[in-house]
Amino acid sequence: MSGSIAANPAWSAALGVLCGVVGFRIGWRTRSRIGLPLVQAALGGVAFVAAWSAAGPDAATLAVLGWSLGSSAVAIPTFRADPVATDARVVRAVPYRAEMRAWLATGRGPEATPARTTARHAAELAAYIVAGVASMNLLSIAMGAVLLNYMNAWVASLLRAARRPWTVRLFAWNVWSVVRVAAYVAIGVASAWPLATRTRFAVPWSAVRPLAVAGAIGVVLDLVLKLALSRPCGRALAAAVDLDAVPSGPAIGDEEHAP
């Protein structure tokens, strides 16, 4: 592959999508809740490093965003088709669904406890940045895989229970969650800079500063949107699904649970 092709932003995004699809497919076949995100992260890391080495941090950001999109595109229909295997193989699938189901059932979301919500976001962000700095973003990508999977499992649960499918498709991935994924991808790439400076992938801080700033703005916007829109979005989703069809505990079936 020529350098000009590798440096094309479309190449980085396409590589990320491919790695997202392949990583999920292989990880799902491990039948393991540990194996799934590890394989996804390994392929995501390949896309990240290849894009950074070819065209720098901006291309790496596109690659990780593509990886997130590719992984989600195959995960949601897979989770929708097999809820029992999903609960067995996806870390936090069951407790996250119970938490989100309670939000729809009661109408009480994060806006009811803004201080606690803010503190939780801050703690998660701190852990994510530490992981990214310590591993040149590779551990952050693994954390991202875990987050994507349990959120996609929730979306699949809503689609199975949908009374108004198009409303569910519109609101299941909340706008603040989309903003958060994009912000965390940018922050994760920026967090790779300290270790990258010690390798042949070194770039000046000016190359990653815009990503760090954009990520910080996105994190704040995520919180603001979550607090402002949680109640109306929750009402719209609750009216569009049959909550009785969304289990509060593990889905029941005959498949053995993975380790």
Image (cartoon, grey):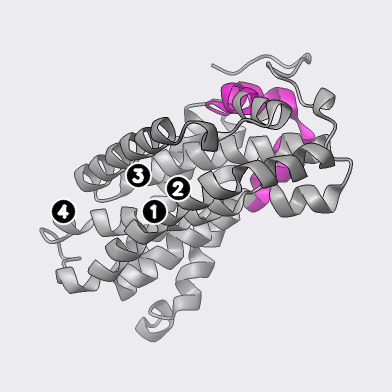
* Residue 54 in the image, given as x and y percentages of width and height: 32, 73
| Label 3 environment density (alpha carbons within 10 Å; few <14, some 14–19, many ≥20) | many
* Residue 180 in the image, given as x and y percentages of width and height: 47, 51
Question: Between marks 1 and 2, how big is the CA–CA gap?
Answer: 5 Å
Q: Which quadrant is home to the N terminus?
A: bottom left
Kind of residue at badge 1: Val
* Residue assigned mark 3: 140
Q: Left of 34 or right of it: where is 139?
A: left
Q: Left of 256 or right of it: where is 26?
A: left
Instruction: Please tell me which of labels 1 and 3 falls first in the chain.
Output: 3
* Residue assigned mark 2: 223
Q: Nearer the viewer, mark 1 or mark 4?
A: 1
Question: Between marks 1 and 4, how big is the CA–CA gap?
Answer: 26 Å
* Residue assigned mark 1: 220
What stretch of residues is rendered in magenta?
A: 73-98
* Residue assigned mark 4: 195
What residue is shown at x 73% (from left), y 19% (from top)?
251
| Label 1 environment density (alpha carbons within 10 Å; few <14, some 14–19, many ≥20) | some
Q: Label 2 near label 1: C-beta < 8 Å?
A: yes
Kind of residue at badge 3: Ser
Question: Between marks 4 and 3, how big is the CA–CA gap?
Answer: 14 Å
Report the front residue among 235 and 84.
235
Q: Main secondary structure of the magenta part?
A: helix
Instruction: Please tell me which of labels 1 and 4 falls first in the chain.
Output: 4
Q: Label 3 near label 1: C-beta < 8 Å?
A: no
Question: Between marks 2 and 3, how big is the CA–CA gap?
Answer: 20 Å
